[in-house]
Image (cartoon, grey):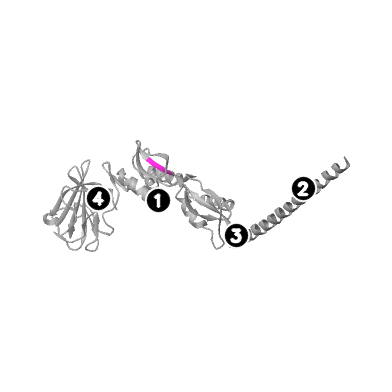
Amino acid sequence: MFALKKTRRRVNIISIKPLKFYTKEVLKFLNITLIALGFIIAIILIKYKPMYEVKISGEEVGYIENKTALSETIKNSINNYNSENIEKIEITENPEYELKLVEKTKEEDESKILVALQRQLEITYKYYEIALNNETIECVNDLETAKQIVEDIKEKSNEEINLIINEKTTKDIDEMNTNTLEIAKENIIKKLNIDTTEEISNINGIKIATLPITGTISSRYGVSSSIRSSKHTGLDIAAPKGTPIKVIADGKVTFAAQNGSYGYLVKVDHGNGVETWYAHTSKMYVTVGEEVKAGDVIAAVGSTGNSTGPHLHLEVRINGEHVNPQKYLY
């Protein structure tokens, strides 16, 4: 029994020795592996660095080191769109980030990424429509400009015009087609054919908007003269030859030709029985049947016909009878 116990003890001692040997070998292998791994990591860290690959719609657009900083830059870029016309800005496709190891020489592509992101921006623009009877007349960028235009048109127009301002939005900037205050106002006046001329006089209900010329009165209505057989039927205004002559009110040309002692004569019918004659002109710029607006140049000062020098002979006739032009002009 004593011998048996001794044998068992020897067996136990023999079995522990190989275990210690294997443990030492494993530790040795692990140490070598760790050293090798550390060496590999050191080489990687020397040659490579971590960066985020940025993808938009699955397509790589660049690399950055700090995605939080890029997100802040994107936010600031959107906030820099400070146009009054922008209602809102949305990013249709947000960037995706994937951490990768890249060569140390690799630089950030922030500018390239921002350019790619700009193509993903959906901008809603705001503008203001000036309309009449549900028809768009003109568009401007801001509400204050629209209000100013409507106010100016109402003040200048000689008739009541009910212009409405509507706020509009669009994602197509070309659809806006907006204009500045002065251009928009001018366009509205032309499109609606608004009469904005100021009245300086009125002849039988016809608005007189301008003088035909500026000059010196050389002969008044009703006076006698050695060069004419009857009293003066008009008003003579002396001015240099070639001075432009303007029609004093809207009307239609009924005569434009040589007419005896009147020389080159232009007659304009203004309606309501009112007619004006412009005589002794050197040139005539209108033809019979032509519609003219107050202020249009219709002829040039001359000395044709029975005349002693360059001047305009102006006659005002009501229902065929000549009247004193100075009741209304000069």
Q: Dot 4: few (<14), some (14–19), or many (≥20) neighbours within 10 Å? A: some
Cα separation, mark 4 vs mark 2, equals 142 Å
Tell me the distance, in whole angstroms, between the alpha carbons under discs 3 and 1.
Answer: 61 Å
Task: Residue 303: give x, y in percent of width and height.
Answer: 17, 61
Dot in front, 4 or 1: 1
Quarter of the picture holding the N terminus: top right
SS at badge 2: helix
Is the residue marked by circle 2 packed among few (<14), some (14-19), or many (20+) residues within 10 Å? few
Q: Which sits in the foreground, 330 or 189?
A: 189
Q: Which mark is residue 44?
A: 3
The answer to which of marks 4 and 1 sits earlier in the sequence is: 1
Whether residues under marks 1 and 2 lie with C-beta atoms below 8 angstroms apart, the answer is no
- Estimate the spatial distance between the alpha carbons at disc 4 and disc 3, rounded to whole Å: 102 Å
Q: Which residue is mark 2?
A: 15
Residue underneath mark 1? 180
Q: Residue at x 58, y 54 (%)?
A: 66
Q: Amino acid at mark 3?
A: Ile
Kindly report the distance in space between the C-alpha atoms of the residues bearing marks 2 and 3.
44 Å
Q: Most extreme residue toward the top, as rendered?
A: 133
Which of labels 3 and 1 is toward the front?
Answer: 3
Q: Are dots 4 and 1 in contact, CB under 8 Å? A: no
Residue at the spot of label 4 = 325
Q: Nearer the viewer, mark 4 or mark 2?
A: 2
Residue 246 location (% of width, % of height): 25, 54
Q: Are marks 2 and 3 in contact (CB under 8 Å)?
A: no
Image x and y of residue 285, in percent: 19, 55
Q: Is 308 left or right of 294, judged from the image as shown?
A: left
Q: Residue at x 40, y 49 (%)?
A: 181
